[in-house]
Every structure is written in structure tokens, then in C-alpha cells.
Amino acid sequence: MRKAILILILGLLLLIMATLRAADGPYLVCDPVRFVTHYEVTLDGEVETVPAYDLGDGTVMLRFDLSGIEMGSHHVSVSAMNVWGMSGPATLDFTKALPDAAVNVRIED
């Protein structure tokens, strides 16, 4: 009985973790690079320093969760950093928008 309860609790925890994991993203990313420890991300004028995402092969990349941003147009600037300094910025403009509704739905043969 105790084993069954333990397995049930473990299963529920895994389900909760999977649900939470599915709720995040999309991500702002970059190609893998070396010698970067952090990125400075400026999104619509708000600056945030985020640790570089270690890929385990000697390279890192940016992985910045955009799930909490509002609908509309956005401007982002990203600079790579390490103990020696900061790179120049890379910029991106994008729009968060819901898809248009399907129009003229019909059956064809």
C-alpha cells in the first residue's frame, strides 16, 4: 500500500512538472558561442542579465523565456558578457499576436 501511494505521488509530481514545463516558452535564443557567461537582454527598455545556457559541449547560448510578454510589437537587444567585457548588441523586432481566425471554411471534393 505504501509503495502504491509513493508511486502515485511520484507520478503526480512528474505530471505537475511536465505541465509547468509545457507552459513556458517560446524562447529568445542565439546560435551556440564560446567564452560567454551571461547575456544582457533589453526587452522594450527593461534590462535583465541572464546566465548563459550551457550546452555541455564547451558552448553556450541564450535561452530567454518570452512567455510572460504582452501582445503587441517588441524590440529586443542582446549583448554577450564575460569577465573581460561586453559584446556589441544584436537586435530583433518582433510581434506577439494571436493567429487570424480561419475564414471561408468549407468542404471541397
Image: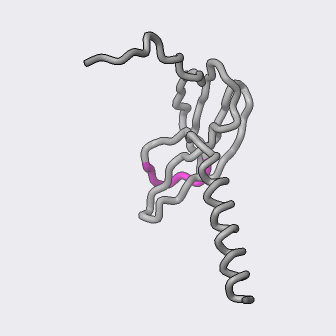
Q: Is residue 55 magenta?
A: no
Q: Nearer the viewer, residue 53 or 38?
A: 53
Residue 6, percent from left and from top:
71, 82
Image quarter for residue 58?
bottom left
**Along the line of sight, the residue nearer the viewer: 1 or 67:** 1
Q: Nearer the viewer, residue 40 or 106?
A: 106
Q: Seen in the image, is 108 located left or right of residue 100?
A: left
Return the residue nearer the eye: 49 or 7. Answer: 7
Q: Is residue 62 left or right of residue 107?
A: right
- Compared with 24, 1 (above or below) is below
Q: Quadrant of the N terminus?
A: bottom right
Magenta highlight range: 32-38
Could you tell me if residue 26 is visible in this image?
Answer: yes
Q: Position of residue 45 (x, y in %)?
A: 72, 26
Q: Residue at x 25, y 18 (%)?
A: 109
Residue at point 65% right, 19% down?
72
